[in-house]
Amino acid sequence: MQLRELMELNRTRRKFDQSQPIDVGTLEALVELTRFMPSGMNKQPLKYIVTTEPDQCDAIFPLLGWAGYLPDWKGPDKGEQPTGYIIMMLDTAIADSPGCDHGIACQSIMLGAVEQGLGGCIIATVNRKKLARIFDLDDRFEILMVLALGVPAQEVVIEPLPSDGDIKYWSGENGRHHVPKRSLDELLIGRFPAK
């Protein structure tokens, strides 16, 4: 796949085919992609936990916030929940801040997931204290993000931003998830030479 195609397929997925488990080795391979990414001052302060263990997945699931623009939706139903998680942490013994490393790492992992036929959701709304207790984490590890992964079971459609500028995503007919995106002309505030 070309990069443009990977980017277009790399949509946030919130429903998965739970009957198709992920192998933990697949998650390890996705984390390994982050070894090759740029890192501020080359500190490489990110650490990870990967799990596909069903009991751990069941324990992680209720600790996550799923869709801020869908306040009545508490996340995917049983049978549509993620079959694997990558917990991304900052090792504060290495750095005080992740800088932008965690953003680069999330995108690297998600692009790798798409290439493998998987989908995922990058989640920052996390009950960090309870999650840290599940894995008995040392205080030096600060949970940054949880990446929920699985075989996608929902179609995501990119829509042009409506004339009122509303950026909120929504679920429509047949379970399709609609995501408005700004046009290239809205992103560019300068073009030199001008067309």
Image (cartoon, grey):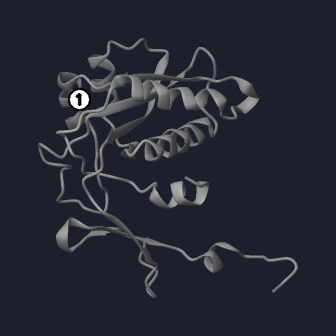
Farthest residue in the right direction? 193
Left or right: where 132 falls relative to 90: left
Q: At 41% from the left edge and 29% from the top edge, which residue is drawn?
A: 27
Q: At 86% from the left edge and 77% from the top edge, which residue is drawn?
A: 192
Q: Nearer the viewer, residue 73 or 27?
A: 27
Farthest residue in the left direction? 78
- Residue labelled with disc 1: 57
| Quarter where residue 49 is shown | top left
| Quarter where residue 183 is shown | bottom right
Q: Is residue 88 above or below residue 174?
A: above
Left or right: where 175 falls relative to 108: left
The image quadrant where one finds the C terminus is bottom right
Q: Nearer the viewer, residue 169 or 112?
A: 112
Local packing at callout 1 (Cα closer than 10 Å; few below 14, some 14-19, many 20+) is some
Q: At 33% from the left edge and 37% from the top edge, which residue is drawn?
A: 126
Left or right: where 62 falls relative to 137: left
Q: Secondary structure at mark 1?
A: helix
Q: Nearer the viewer, residue 26 or 164?
A: 26
Q: Amino acid at mark 1?
A: Cys
Q: At 61% from the left edge and 36% from the top edge, which residue is drawn?
A: 101
Left or right: where 166 falls relative to 32: left
Q: Nearer the viewer, residue 80 or 123?
A: 80
| Total count of labels | 1
